[in-house]
Amino acid sequence: MMSKALHITQIQHHLSLLDMEKLQEARDFIEFLFNKAAVPKPGVVKLEGIWKGKGFEKMNLETELESVRKNVSAAIMKKVA
């Protein structure tokens, strides 16, 4: 049994070979199938506040970034030497 991703890849390949007129027909047919299937539109997912109360409020970003920069620089210099 073929996976969904493989089906999509094959359809994309076939669509890329069609001329503009046939491509429009294919688009119309796909829209017909889409409307007939009543595929629900994906809802909006809000990620606001997911990190609240996890301790990040207490972090000093400038200090953390400086520490990361120093560590990365040291690691690069160690590899170069």
Image: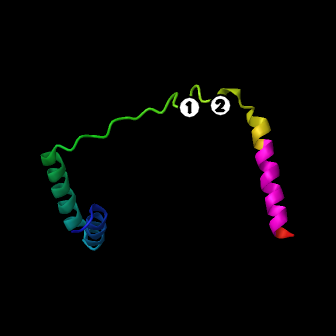
User: As drawn, is 12 to the left or to the right of 47?
Assistant: left
User: As drawn, is 46 to the left or to the right of 16?
Assistant: right
Q: Is 58 one of the magenta-colored residues?
A: no
Residue at label 2? 56
Amino acid at dot 2: Phe
**Residue 36 % position (x, y):** 12, 47
Q: Quadrant of residue 58?
A: top right
Identify the element where label 1 is drawn: loop
The quadrant in which the N terminus is found is bottom left
Q: Main secondary structure of the magenta part?
A: helix
> Which residue is rendered at x = 19% and y = 49% of the image?
34
Answer whether labels 1 and 2 touch (C-beta < 8 Å). Answer: yes
- Tell me the magenta residue range: 66-79
Q: Quadrant of residue 61?
A: top right
Residue at label 1? 51
Identify the element where label 2 is drawn: helix
